DNA sequence: TTGACTTATATCCTAAAAGGATATAGATTA
DNA sequence: TAATCTATATCCTTTTAGGATATAAGTCAA
């Protein structure tokens, strides 16, 4: 087992945020879509490795609809089996905006955390004044 | 209820990453410390609002020790009741470094997500070519 | 010297979320 | 008509968060 792999499996204990909800909201902010398509399209945001398990996506979509952030309707037109097409509601758009606000703060926190780590690490390996 | 408050309570459904584990590892990267002190000191990293509930911190510390990322010993010297003092192990330092790697990727993802939101939003409100 | 407060750790319970497995079913095509 | 693809739905188990509460030692002032 490589050092790299060891590190990653060990740190796997700590939970990683995958931002499923904001990814779905963003996927719909660009226009109406449906579960099967979103599973593929939200990968682009880079928050999860590979595709999300379908059960997770459909569960999230139902929950978003319960909370009024998206609305849905069956679309039987077109090829293939019927799709449940989701649309972002005005409330959903507000919530997405709040997520973006939060993400901006998070970027600041993460950036300063990283800098802090580097500075302590540097001071440890290069003690300029011992 | 203000628009702002409404937004925030609605988006409260989505889980927010609070980075408890990396915060604790970072708190110990700077030097040995103990639960009660860490509860206060890790606030500085900005990942949680207010102080973390003690139960959460002690649970995390025990778990980190189980996984060999920190070690502990009782310190009865000094004022006040005995403290269980934690120290970061070499493994803990590796995991912290892996967290920092992950955080750098996360900053990139978040930044591009934010930009994407702004560009779609702009195109929507200012349709230059309709 | 005892009662209140602070420091410090530990345990327990409940609700929510993740993760994954599996079921259902229509449409397409070989 | 059987296999495959598209698409959604449901179920179960484990993990985590969040919070409440218990325990106990040390400090300090009346």
Image: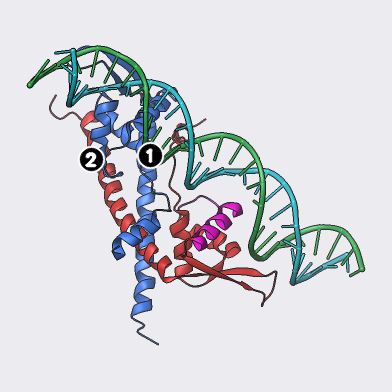
Chain colours: A blue, B red, C green, D cyan
Is residue A31 shown above or below B30? above
Q: Nearest the camera: B126 or D9?
A: D9
Q: Is mark 2 on a helix, strand or loop?
A: helix
Q: What stretch of residues is rendered in magenta? A: B47-66
Question: Farthest residue toward the bottom?
Answer: A130
Q: Name the residue under label 1.
A: A99
- In this picture, residue B93 sits left or right of residue B84: left
In the image, what residue occupies the spot 23% across and 40% down?
A44
In the image, what residue occupies the spot 27% across and 32% down?
A39
Tell me which chain the residue with mark 2 is part of. Answer: A
Q: What element carries label 1?
A: helix
Q: Mark 2 points at which residue?
A: A44
Cα distance in 3D space between marks 2 and 1: 17 Å
Is residue D7 shown above or below A103? above
Q: Is residue B93 magenta?
A: no
Q: Residue A46 carries which label?
A: none
Tell me which chain the residue with mark 1 is part of. Answer: A
Q: Nearest the camera: A2 or B69?
A: A2
Q: Is residue B82 visible?
A: yes
In the image, what residue occupies the spot 51% across and 61% down?
B66
Tell us which disc is closer to us: 2 or 1.
2
Disc nearer the start of the sequence (2/1): 2
Q: Quadrant of the C terminus of chain B?
A: top left
In the image, what residue occupies the spot 49% across and 51% down?
B48
The location of residue A120, given as percent across then percent down, is: 39, 72
Magenta segment's dominant SS is: helix
Q: Residues within 10 Å of mark 1 (few under 14, many from 20)?
A: many
């Amino acid at each position: 087992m490589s050092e790299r792999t060891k590190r990653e499996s060990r740190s796997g204990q700590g939970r990683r945020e995958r931002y499923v909800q904001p990814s779905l909201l963003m996927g719909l902010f660009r226009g109406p879509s449906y579960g099967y398509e979103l599973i593929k399209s939200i990968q682009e945001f880079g928050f999860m490795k590979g595709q999300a398990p379908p059960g997770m996506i459909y569960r999230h979509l139902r929950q978003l609809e319960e909370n009024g952030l998206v609305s849905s309707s069956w679309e039987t037109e077109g090829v293939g089996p019927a799709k449940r097409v989701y649309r972002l509601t005005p409330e959903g758009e507000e919530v997405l905006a709040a997520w973006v606000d939060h993400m901006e703060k998070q970027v600041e926190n993460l950036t300063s955390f990283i800098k802090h780590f580097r500075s302590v690490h540097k001071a440890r390996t290069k003690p300029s004044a011992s």
